[in-house]
Image (cartoon, helix red, strand yellow):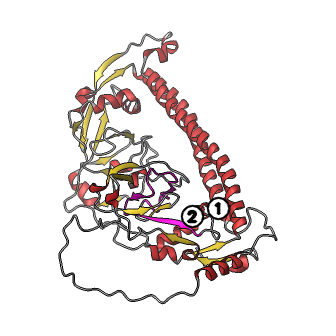
Amino acid sequence: MEKMNPMDLPLNWQIVRFEEIATFTKKPKDLRYSEYSEVPFVPMRLIPIATLFSKEFIRKPTNTFGSGTYFEPGDILLAKITPSFENGKQCIIQELPTPFGIATTEVIPIREVEGLSDKIYLFYYLLAPDVRALLTARMKGTTGRLRLGAEALADLEIPLPPLAEQRRIVAKLEVLFTQLDAAVDNLKKAQAQLHRYRRSILKAAFEEEATKEWREGHSDTWERMKLSEFITLESGSRPKGGVRGILEGIPSLGGEHLNAEGSFKFEKIKYVPKAFFESLNKGRIYPDDIIVVKDGATTGKTSFVDNDFPHKDAAVNEHLFIVRVDPKVASPKFVFYYLFSSKGQQQILSDFRGATVGGISRNFPLKVTVPIPSLTEQAEIVSELERHLSAADEIEANLDAELKRAERLRQSILKQAFSGKLVPQDPNDEPASVLLEKIQTEKGPQQPKRKKTTTKAKTTLSAKQMSLPLN
């Protein structure tokens, strides 16, 4: 985000620092949590993404707190730790059963300055993509634990319109975003319906009724066979010493690269030395291979290696199985579609072992039985399946494009809002500069801050005598 230029804004706007028009809520010194048996608590999981108002909290006994952030009803709760901040986790909780609440330590509670700034205006400004990018660059800490400091947020520049115009902007944003949210909701419902449609056609494809008309001119029959009877199974491999730091060679794919649609996403791929797989001759994948995830969060998920696979020379790691089908018995793609169907997934996962982190064993093919028609009928089923799935993919692509367009539109609306182009200016509005002067006058001359002094405690306080270490 480039430094703001006052010349790009309407005349009655001002560019100010965030701390001039907002405050960070602090716990009053005389407040004792022990006066309450329990208080509302907001963990990070209950802070939604880019949601204006939330009513989510849990009641927690005060004697169970070890740390937390004090906030008051109406505060903006802004997540400050990665990746919650980058994901846009923030909300306002207006109603609490007590005069205050306690949130995770990983939030900054923000309040508007009465008569100068509008809370919802501040809320939306903090969601603007350019603002998020700028604040993300100011985060500090170790990898995976980056945090946005209150000082960095205080120093953020923000365009300040007259208070009346702020409220007009907020009103316009709420109308436009309500319409946009309704459109996005309809698109997501259509996606869900499409997902159910895919599941239904996959289910129907492996029932004899699906090709009943086709079979009228044929004498083909179906039989059920164990997967183990007509496939070979191979495990992926992990080279000695790992793959860290290797930037070229053979792509090594894992379960994290497989999405719900059975396609590989080629992001953050690790590489292994080509010589390793050439010498071992294990874990390499070829066209017509079926990939099955052995363990982890995506256990049982499957994918198919076709001739259009982006990496012709690739391998899989130790978390994946390679299934190779005897083409004299079954079409590899027919078997893949069956394993990908809900029935196939159910059978694969019947071999699942372990608790939270578990997986399937090399014996899973013994648990899977596949309906096998003739090779000719298999080809007919695959052809019909791909015709329907191709149409579904086209619709899915259009839905994705519309969702991305909606997000771009949302960003464009925010950009217009904070550049003075969303609503017309009113010459009767009191300029922002006048509002700032009034606030400064009411505050009076600023007293210089005294340096903190520390003295050694004469007595050691017990844990009960000490106030809880809450912000």
- Dot 1 alpha-carbon crowd within 10 angstroms: few under 14, some 14 to 19, many 20 or more: many
Q: Which residues are magenta?
A: 84-113
- Above-or-below relation of 440 to 249: below
> Element at badge 1?
helix
- In depth, the one of 8 and 454 nearer the eye is 454
- Is residue 462 shown left or right of residue 116? left
Residue 220: numbered disc: none
- Is residue 405 shown left or right of residue 244? right
Residue 129: numbered disc: 2
What amino acid is at disc 2?
Answer: Pro
Name of the residue lying farthest toward the right: 427
Tag 1 residue: 414
* Residue 244 image-quadrant placement: bottom left
Q: Residue at x 61, y 39 (%)?
A: 186
Q: Earlier in the sequence, mark 1 or mark 2?
A: 2
> Element at badge 2?
helix
- Report the quarter where the C terminus lies: bottom left
- Is residue 87 shown left or right of residue 295? right
- Is residue 1 shown left or right of residue 5? left
- Above-or-below relation of 18 to 333: below
Residue 341 at what x, y percent from top left? 40, 30
- In depth, the one of 295 and 102 nearer the eye is 102
Residue 362 at what x, y percent from top left? 21, 37
